[in-house]
Amino acid sequence: MLGCFLCACDVWKKHVIYRSNSCSRNCGAKKNFRIFSSNFSSFTTGGVFVTNYIPAPFRADRFYHAVSAQVRAPVAVSACLVGAAVRYDGTDKRLGAIEQWLDGALQLLPVCPEVGAGLGVPRPPVQLVMAASDDQPRARGRDDDRLDVTEPLRRYAEQSARTLRAQHFLCGYLFKSRSPSCGVNSAPLLDSTGKNIGTANGIQADYFQRELPWLVYCEESALGDERNSLRFILQCRLVFDVLHAGAVPLTELQQHYYFLIEKFSSKKFFSLRRSSISLIHGNGFLER
Ligand code: SF4
């Protein structure tokens, strides 16, 4: 059903490799592709992958820069999701999808804002609280409301955004859901009496979304299956492609990506289509 992505073969139906681990056609690559059965379950895995439901964007000639098809786009990730024991109680929240799908395609940069802010492991658990006098949620101790770690978390968010952006072509951020630091509008929000009044962004997630709006944001809870994981990877690689392009005219990029907008015009791919459009028109996207 699928071919080797490295040689970007157009005739991928003829370029079938079933239950094999090397490209027998153009480039002879080994271990650099993934082969899927017709129902999308993989036979074997490698670094770069293609599937027959999103074939076009992963072809080298469809990226603005051909190299974008082969590099692993840098993406920040909540450190507990990659197995680091950094949660308040010294445990982790290892995510299977990372090893299974994301690791080979993205360069994952683990970040734990609470450790980065100097709160240590183990540490008292915190939660988001919005008192009547507050204009923003604050991160206060769950067991001792005199504890307020909002300012160190805000300082770390600013510092980590600056560092990650300066050192990498940062393309996305995979967050742990429901965390007062990392949740993307999923962290429980309480009032000063302890009553649940909704959900909010964690401190880190809120800062990044405000300051770096062109990144691809996702919570681990949205990566429950291969399809969603591949969609996230594709979005991050497109962002990498545009960042890598540098200061090219937006009209040129728009023309280049027009194929993608058409490709994903169905309702099923609406979010991907929307992200490809905002990718091109994204505010400040090319300022790096
Ligand atoms: S959710 Fe965020 S702050 Fe909490 S342990 Fe994971 S990386 Fe650290």
Image (cartoon, rainbow, N blue to C red):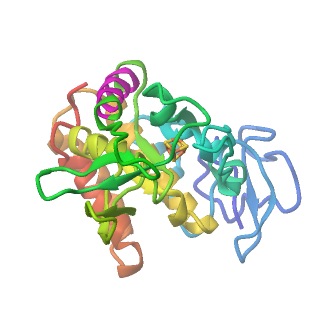
Question: Residue 162 colored magenta?
Answer: yes
Q: Which residues are magenta?
A: 154-164
The residue drawn where x is 63% and y is 65% is 226
Disc count in the image?
0
Question: Residue 33 colored magenta?
Answer: no
Residue 174: percent from left, percent from top: 48, 48
Taking the image as shown, residue 45 lies to the left or right of residue 225, namely right
The residue drawn where x is 20% and y is 46% is 282
The vertical placement of 269 against 207, above or below, is below
Depth check: 175 or 230 in front?
Answer: 175
Residue 210: percent from left, percent from top: 21, 44
Q: Quadrant of residue 85?
A: top right
Most common secondary structure along the magenta stretch: helix
The vertical placement of 85 against 132, above or below, is above
Q: Quadrant of the C terminus?
A: top left
Depth check: 96 or 3 in front?
Answer: 96
Depth check: 192 or 122 in front?
Answer: 192
Residue 256: percent from left, percent from top: 29, 48
The vertical placement of 75 against 131, above or below, is above
The residue drawn where x is 54% and y is 58% is 220
**Residue 105 in view (yes/no):** no
**Residue 195 in view (yes/no):** yes
Residue 253: percent from left, percent from top: 24, 43
Taking the image as shown, residue 156 lies to the left or right of residue 20, namely left
The residue drawn where x is 22% and y is 38% is 211
